[in-house]
Image (tube, grey):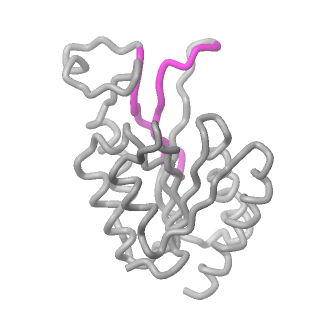
Amino acid sequence: MAGPGKCLLVTGPPGVGKSTLVMRVFETLKASYPNLKIQGFYTSEVREGSERVGFQVVTLDGRTAPLSSSTISSPESLRWPTVGKYKVDVASFESLALPELQVREDTDLFIVDEVGKMELFSSSFFPCVLRILESNVPFLATVPVPKFGRDIPAVARLKNHPGATMFTLSKGNRDAVKEEIYSHLVALLSKQ
């Protein structure tokens, strides 16, 4: 079971910079500690011109796969779950993201951006997240803010985990939160 403070969760409204913060922490850690074994993924927007048409999942070593799209219209996409205007390509997400969430002996840190509605359409995703929590490897993840005051059940379970520390991001505290998370992770990693 992840010890106290080993599960760091970043939340905040859409567009506040959660993904950017996580990537800056990752880049700073890799620059300072190049031998760290960090596994996981982040999500990024897919744009056509100025319009967002979907999201992709990106591994920490740069491999990409579609996560969702508002423009795809293949026969198989008719069966895909939707979030707003986006159809979620669960198989594509699972093929790239799930191998990144396998606990290995040499893993120093997991980064998951994000534990959200699209990712949770994968029935295998959250069990992987729970195995990470049980592994005692530090875990940095982003989670969405509650909609209408209610969390997604899996997100609520993460937030209530005894090892979880929440950071609520705003435009005014981004630099301070980045420094706090970085310092927290360096302290955790130095104890391993």
Closer-to-camera residue (142/73): 142
Question: Is 54 above or below relative to 122?
Answer: above
> What's the magenta region?
50-70
Residue 125, percent across and down?
30, 52
Residue 53, percent across and down?
49, 18
Question: Is 30 above or below relative to 82?
Answer: below
Residue found farthest to the bottom: 191
| Left or right position of 47 against 148 | right
Q: Is residue 31 visible?
A: yes
User: Could you tell me what secondary structure mostly forms the magenta stretch?
Assistant: strand
Residue 95, percent across and down?
30, 44
The residue shown at (52%, 46%) is 42
Q: How many marks?
A: 0
The residue shown at (47%, 24%) is 54
Question: Is 41 above or below relative to 190?
Answer: above
The residue shown at (53%, 45%) is 62
Q: Quadrant of the N terminus?
A: bottom left
Q: Is residue 192 within the magenta segment?
A: no
The residue shown at (30%, 11%) is 73
Q: Is residue 53 within the magenta segment?
A: yes
Residue 57, percent across and down?
45, 40
Q: Is residue 63 visible?
A: no
Closer-to-camera residue (38/179): 179
| Left or right position of 83 against 159 | left
Displayed quadrant of residue 77 = top left
Q: Quadrant of the C terminus?
A: bottom right
Displayed quadrant of residue 175 = bottom right
| Left or right position of 26 against 105 | right
Closer-to-camera residue (5/36): 5
